[in-house]
Image: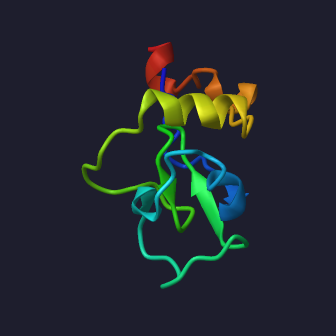
Amino acid sequence: MSNDLSFYCKAYVLKDLRRFSKWNEGLLLGQGPAVPTDDTVVFIHPDFRVTATVYAPEGESELPSRDWIEFCTNELQFVIPDELSRPVATEADQE
């Protein structure tokens, strides 16, 4: 079974992420506006990394902290929709 969630992300305005007590603009991955504002739209991915575009982060970057994951889950209500979190059957699985 295959379940690649690299295509999934959820949009938020930066104002909401800035409520995190340890937020800093260095957590924002990728090329975004030179000076992001509270209204800048950013994207949280299944691994809880934040990007300026819908594209998943490339390469290695620092893994998010437990505090950040809890904030996203509890305060932002970030969850992967059930229909996406279930394993997807492929032809290879049926052989």
Query: In the visual, does 67 lie left or right of 75?
Result: left
Say which quadrant the C terminus sits in. top left
Which residue is at 53% across, 82% downward? 35
Query: In the visual, does 34 lie left or right of 9?
Result: left
Q: Toward which corner of the image does residue 30 lie, by quadrant?
A: bottom left
- Residue sitting farthest toward the left: 60
Q: Colour mode?
A: rainbow
Compared to residue 74, the image places residue 24 above or below, namely: below
Question: Residue 23: horizontal and vertical position, in percent?
Answer: 51, 52
Residue 58 or 12: which is nearer the viewer?
A: 12
Q: Toward which corner of the image does residue 54 lie, by quadrant?
A: bottom right
Question: Residue 91: horizontal and vertical position, in percent?
Answer: 50, 26
Compared to residue 94, the image places residue 57 above or below, namely: below
Residue 32 or 20: which is nearer the viewer?
A: 20
How many numbered marks are there? 0
Compared to residue 38, the image places residue 1 above or below, namely: above
Q: Toward which corner of the image does residue 86 lie, by quadrant?
A: top right
- Residue sitting farthest toward the bottom: 34
Which residue is at 40% across, 55% downward? 57
Residue 27 or 22: which is nearer the viewer?
A: 22
Question: Residue 16: horizontal and vertical position, in percent?
Answer: 71, 54
Question: Residue 7: horizontal and vertical position, in percent?
Answer: 55, 49
